[in-house]
């Protein structure tokens, strides 16, 4: 026979953890039982049998177990009140952000012309977080994919062509060691047809070891640097080069990785550049330094054809919203979630008819009347709060996480007209989460089809992709956000508002006024440097922000938060690699293996950039590593009695005993593999 349920102690001492004090009432069953038994003598003095087999004691035990969850919920009231206050103030969890990737399209050689791939082409990938559902990536632009391949690369230096022989994945200099005017990169393309009308390339910039370069945005004061070079693209048509127009340049002039789209001429005949003999004619592209020069030569790792940017989100079109029960038609829900807020377009049919609505640019409704009239459809506007609008304002709010759309009540915002399925989402996108942060060549499952497209993949890893912010993080960020109110007034506001950048992977940020990371120790007015730390994915190296994250942070802060004229420079954080060597003594009879494991974990947790430090919220930027703090951290471990020896090794250099380590300004620490050994206790004679 199994034990009765009220005797089980599976939840003993499992009172809910609270984020805030005070504790309104002791919530454990032991505390409730003590309170009841303590009152027996005052209220029922004749009750003297307090042994466990007494029926009254059994009822006391039952009552304490039943009261424990009630008191736990009571103690959550301060948290609940705080959450409701943040909701009233407009503070919501940061929404899941979708990952982005560059997709490469391969076209069959039998294609008679370039293949037009419309925006919204879908390709799937197995998610990076291990879930079962495919992550769908959609292309963000139209693409003319050419049946062509890059077969040769040459550098022109002083009218002499030098072939680039770097293997796939190896780096090369597109303009040699001294990038100056007149030097050029020539790209030979093999194709049976004339590509066009556009050609899209993907260029991968090889970042210096450790971190990508800082990304500036905004500002009006020129930096103390020479202007960048002017680059020109052209094609070799037979025997002469013809300039081509640059439609899109995400690289910023070979500064960042990205795509470049060129408008090609009608005629692009194969040929051979001057000085290149003995090869089959190819279609040649030329990238030339027309004027200016690079301070340092850019380093490329690869150039690909037929590249287009894609987002880990699915588009849904023409969906009728479902009313939320008991909401009086004021709330309706979308079928797919989480929703990308900027993507939602809501149209409402009000039951009347109109001859024309030119400002909406809407197609004729399918239920047009015989007289040529069509149902009157209006496009409503998404806002953040209905309370600021009057009874005639056609506005709505969106909860991206739940997919619930809220309309006005006739006082604050217009009411939705009566009707059946008369509120429709013209289009919206759903997606987001860390599952989209997949590796290279993982996006390869075709969900759409176009003739002559034989293969689609991502030659480089996807970037971005964050899950919805956890409740604990929202509660911590809320008061700071209320103080900032969406504008960067103080320097600390930049670090706070950086986390709101769309498409950015950010766990922590740190802002410094007047600091440009490219000019350390040289204060520059009108600049705010923002150091960014992404989440730690547990892959070994320190968490280093990628180019897309830095660009998203700099753009968001410059456009939406910074005062006019302020230049925001987003930069990856520098890390010092720290190794601790320690000899410790333990209490006699203690489990030495457990003590060593606890010591290694304590060191890792203390030095971690995201969960380390004294308060467990991350090592402070530029914070000094004190020798005594390490010793104190180790001696707090159970059964560890002393630390006779402790050495700090920073970036491979050993520091003197009892010496503190002072990191570079605004840098963080990264724990390496420590060494902790047990030292035998000396016997007292």
Image (tube, rainbow, N blue to C red):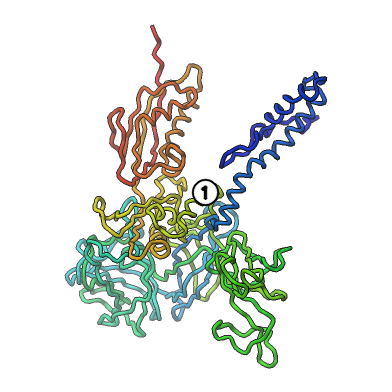
Q: Position of residue 48 (x, y in %)?
A: 80, 18
Q: Position of residue 125 (x, y in %)?
A: 53, 60
Residue 643, located in which quarter of the rendered image? top left
Q: From where the camera sits, is residue 136 visible? A: yes
Q: Residue at x 24, y 76 (%)?
A: 273
Residue 403 lies, with reference to residue 421, above or below; the image says: above
From the image, which quarter does the N terminus lie in? top right
Question: What residue is pinned by disc 1?
Answer: 473
Answer with left or right where residue 219 lies relative to residue 473: left
For label 1, count other residues whose C-alpha is less than 10 Å away and answer few (under 14), some (14-19) or many (20+): few
Answer with left or right where residue 548 lies relative to residue 44: left
Q: Residue at x 39, y 28 (%)?
A: 631
Residue 15, located in which quarter of the rendered image? top right
Given residues 682 and 271, the one toward you in this image is 682
Residue 22 lies, with reference to residue 599, above or below; the image says: below
Q: Residue at x 39, y 31 (%)?
A: 630
Answer with left or right where residue 296 lies relative to residue 503: left
Q: Position of residue 10 (x, y in %)?
A: 68, 33
Per the image, label 1 sits on a secondary structure element best described as helix
Residue 105 lies, with reference to residue 640, above or below; the image says: below
């Amino acid at each position: 026979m199994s034990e009765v349920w009220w005797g089980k102690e599976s939840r003993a001492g499992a009172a809910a953890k609270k984020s805030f004090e005070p504790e309104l009432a002791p919530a454990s069953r032991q505390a409730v039982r003590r309170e009841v038994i303590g009152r027996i003598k005052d209220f029922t003095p004749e009750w003297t049998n307090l042994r466990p087999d007494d029926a009254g004691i059994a009822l006391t035990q039952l009552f304490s177990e039943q009261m424990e969850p009630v008191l736990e919920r009571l103690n959550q009231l301060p948290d609940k009140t705080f959450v409701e206050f943040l909701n009233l103030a407009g503070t919501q969890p940061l929404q899941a952000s979708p990952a982005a990737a560059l997709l490469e399209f391969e076209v069959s050689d039998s294609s008679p012309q370039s293949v037009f791939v419309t925006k919204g082409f879908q390709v799937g990938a197995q998610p990076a977080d291990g879930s079962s559902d495919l992550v769908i990536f959609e292309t963000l632009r139209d693409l003319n994919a050419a049946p062509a391949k890059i077969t040769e690369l040459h550098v022109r230096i002083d009218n002499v062509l030098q072939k680039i022989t770097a293997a796939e994945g190896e780096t090369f200099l597109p303009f040699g060691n001294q990038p100056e005017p007149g030097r050029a990169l020539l790209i030979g393309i093999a194709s049976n047809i004339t590509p066009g009308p556009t050609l899209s390339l993907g260029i991968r910039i090889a970042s210096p070891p450790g971190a990508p370069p800082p990304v500036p945005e905004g500002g009006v004061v020129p930096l103390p640097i020479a202007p960048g070079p002017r680059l020109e693209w052209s094609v070799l048509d037979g025997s002469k080069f013809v300039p081509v127009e640059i439609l899109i340049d995400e690289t910023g002039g070979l500064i960042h990785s990205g795509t470049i789209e060129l408008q090609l001429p009608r005629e692009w005949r194969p040929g051979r550049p001057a000085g290149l003999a003995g090869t089959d004619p190819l279609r040649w592209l030329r990238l030339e330094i027309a004027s200016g020069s690079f301070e340092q030569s850019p380093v490329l790792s690869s150039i690909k054809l037929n590249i287009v940017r894609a987002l880990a989100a699915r588009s849904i079109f023409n969906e009728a919203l479902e009313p939320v029960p008991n909401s009086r038609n004021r709330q309706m829900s979308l079928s797919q979630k989480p929703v990308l807020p900027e993507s939602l377009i809501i149209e409402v049919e009000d039951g009347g008819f109109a001859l024309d609505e030119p400002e909406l640019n809407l197609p004729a409704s399918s239920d047009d009347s015989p007289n040529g009239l069509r149902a009157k459809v209006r496009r409503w506007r998404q806002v953040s709060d209905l309370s600021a609008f009057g009874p005639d304002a056609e506005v709505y709010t969106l909860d991206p996480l739940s997919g619930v759309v809220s309309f006005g009540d006739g006082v604050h915002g217009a009411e939705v007209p009566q009707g059946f399925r008369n509120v429709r989402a013209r289009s919206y996108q759903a997606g987001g989460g860390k599952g989209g942060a997949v590796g290279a060549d993982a996006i390869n499952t075709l969900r759409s089809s176009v003739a002559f497209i034989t293969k689609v993949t991502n030659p480089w890893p996807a970037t971005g992709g964050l899950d919805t912010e956890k409740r604990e993080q929202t509660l911590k960020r809320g008061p700071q956000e209320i103080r900032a109110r969406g504008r960067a007034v103080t320097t600390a506001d930049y670090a706070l508002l950086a986390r709101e950048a769309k498409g950015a992977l950010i766990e922590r940020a740190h802002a410094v006024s007047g600091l440009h990371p490219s000019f350390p120790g040289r204060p520059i007015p009108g600049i705010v440097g923002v150091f960014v730390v992404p989440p730690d994915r547990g892959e070994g190296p320190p968490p280093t922000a990628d180019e897309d994250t830095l660009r998203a942070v700099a753009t968001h802060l410059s456009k939406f938060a910074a005062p006019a004229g302020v230049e925001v420079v987003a930069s990856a954080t520098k890390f010092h690699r720290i190794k601790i060597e320690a000899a410790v003594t333990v209490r006699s009879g203690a489990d030495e293996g457990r003590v060593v494991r606890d010591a290694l974990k304590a060191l890792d947790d203390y030095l971690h950039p995201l969960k380390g430090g004294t308060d467990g919220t991350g090592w402070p930027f530029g914070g000094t590593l004190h020798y005594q703090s390490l010793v104190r951290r180790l001696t707090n471990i159970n059964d560890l009695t002393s630390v006779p020896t402790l050495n700090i090794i920073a970036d491979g250099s050993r520091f003197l005993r009892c010496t503190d380590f002072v990191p570079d300004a605004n840098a963080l620490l990264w724990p390496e593999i420590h060494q902790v050994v047990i030292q035998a206790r000396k016997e007292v004679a």
